Image: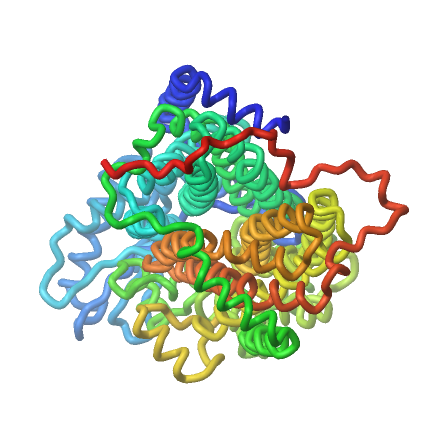
Amino acid sequence: MSFTQALARGSGRRPWRTVIIWVLALVTALALTSQLLGDALTSSITFTDEPESITASNLIEQVRGEPTDTEFVVVTSEGIDISDPAFAAYVTEIESTLLGLGPDVVTSVGTYLSETGPVSESGLSALLPVVVAGDGVDETGVNAEVVRDTLADVPAPDGFQALMAGPATLNSDFNTIAEEDLRTGETIGIAVALVVLVLVFGSVVSGVIPVILGVVAIGIAMGLAALLGLFMDLSFFITNMITMIGLAVGIDYSLFIVSRYREERLHGFEKLDAISRAGATATRAVFFSGLTVVLALVGLLILPNTLFRALGLGAILVVLVAVLASMTLLPAVLSLLGDRIESLRVRRRRTMDEQGRMWDRITKTVMGRPVLSVVFAGGILLLAASSLFSINKGLSGVSTLPDEMESKQAFEILATEFAGGFTSPIEVVVTGSDIPDTLANLESDLAADGGFGPAIIDPLSSDDMAVLSVQTLGDVNSIESQEALRHLRADIVPGAVVGGTEVFVGGETAITVDFLDQVDDYTPIVFTVVLGLSFILLLLAFRSLVIPAKAIAMNLLSVGAAYGLVVATFQADVGPAWIKEFAGFLGFEQVETIEAWLPLFLFSILFGLSMDYHVFLLSRIKERFDQTGDNTESVAYGLRTTGALITGAAIIMVAVFAGFAAGRLVMFQQLGFGLAIAVLLDATIVRSVLVPASMKLLGDRNWYFPSWLEWIPNISIEGHIDKVVPQAEPVEPAPA
């Protein structure tokens, strides 16, 4: 008896004890989440190594002291310039009101009246630099919200407007929209998943069970993340990842196991025997599928920054909890409900023959013309992937926010009246013995270049170290700003350095560029680790060299197609017009860059999820092949018995991911769309066409396993089912 079968049978024999343990775990997790998780979440991304931008930040701290957050109040008027007393009165009122919040919230406020704040060339706009108190990103973020709320309460004269912009304000807006997108994604995902499950199973009770299991997995994973937050800062995106991945895999895993249990009951096995047989087959496949997903996600932990590690850890936690719940809690629930899972029927339950007819026709068509099927399906995927070669990677800046957000409106005024990079300039740190000469060279070269805004030497600079703040001409995360920074590092700085000086380039744009370079450097390593571990696991599971190699090739095809469609859908000036029209219909933003973290994250997630379907399908094929030795019939049997199930599971995943794509943040639109379209391609073109056609072409060579590898232990996914004799008559539970 396999360990998954033993766990399922044991949980089924003692269902109440198992359920109580899970309920206690869930209550504990919810308590931990409410008490600890909020303090562990942060909107900042930190490197665990030290690229040039971080070295520059550390040196700047020696010059300026502890870093402070400076927000900018943008005061504009419709035709009244700064010389008008009304303008001065409004600025004075804002200054006194904000200073009235006290030094625990606002350290200082600058204005043009005291020559501590700039004005635009037109004279119709003024900036008030507001130094916000607080220790760290999160505390300054809270205080910045207080400042913004207070500013909104200051009555503006007719024709005047005051908006707030800055790092903390921008982070707050991103966080607010991310939380709203999370609620939207949860609502859409759960609602559609429930409808699909009820239609797949034909009864309400059977449909509700996987949703409950998914929610339990999410709740407990959140609690584990809260505990993890005691030891490390976690990106606030971790909650989105846990919810999205938890809904997808938690529901899918339960769907496969409940379906196998119902199939065994239909074949005439007693309740506990049906639970045991499902544990030996479907649950074992779930265990290996979950392990494959975890191995794929381990690649994210290799990158030395907190964003990837938090996203990877969050997804790993919820997958592990979902697998454990499927192995123990689900059998206990099935034992308690018994045939009552068929209650509240919405349609007649179809026989296995009825469910398999359509898939028999598809399989016959595909396997009847295997070469044509492979060429056709592979061609579609390669065509979809073609836009990938035009990808531009970056990070979401303020320009990607919805138009109604105050921080975006303020940025647009900054870009028009001042310089887009005024609030977050490039910071050039000069150290050594010839600082004045190097600074003079830098100032003259930057002025002559024309690709930068004003450059100002920090008054706190000393003879040993100086900081030169250089404004960019656009959004600090834009392609234009990135290219300017690379030009500064590669061309201007080397030509300006004199004698024994060293120059380090930092600032927000530099952090973005270093992040992009880090992702590019580690991508081959992550690919190698994920593909290598997946190959080894599939080799052990199926005892074949061909099956894992072919599975990896097909998954890379579907991932590449998803990449290409994301680029064609979201990146401006890439892709055919009809895709752009479709993107506009769905409300997707057109941006100049695809999120830099997205390709690597999509690869890890999609590779794991794609292997899910591959493992479920191949486990049924291998199970039949071991019984009959007939490759063609085994492939047809596998597709016939899993086709409807995999399609239902894919629809659920697509619904969950599409729910997150329905949000307003471009990063989540790209992520949700990429995951949804990849799962859709994988469950249709790959599983329905490429897999059966390629297996028909290769024949018995699919199961090639050289004799010199016979020493490898046999841990086959299909496992061993104890010989249990079913009842004389198949069980067909009566509708409730």
Q: Is residue 73 at least partly visible in the picture?
A: yes
Q: Is residue 563 at least partly visible in the picture?
A: no
Quadrant in which the C terminus is drawn: top left
Q: Classify residue 35 as left or right of residue 151.
A: right
Residue 512 location in percent, x, y?
Answer: 55, 58
The residue lying furthest to the front in this view is 728
Q: In the depicted view, which residue is nearer to us: 199 or 178?
A: 199
Residue 589, quarter of picture? bottom left
Residue 379, quarter of picture? bottom right
Residue 338, quarter of picture? top left
The residue lying furthest to the bottom in this view is 577
The residue lying furthest to the right in this view is 708
Query: Residue at left 59%, top 69%?
Result: 443
Residue 658 location in percent, x, y?
Answer: 37, 58
Q: In the depicted view, which residue is nearer to us: 275 or 65?
A: 275
Residue 218 location in percent, x, y?
Answer: 41, 36
Query: Residue at left 49%, top 28%?
Result: 273
Residue 666, compared with residue 483, is above or below; it is above
Query: Residue at left 49%, top 71%?
Result: 565
Quadrant in which the N terminus is drawn: top right
Query: Residue at left 25%, top 58%?
Result: 163
Color scheme of the displayed model: rainbow
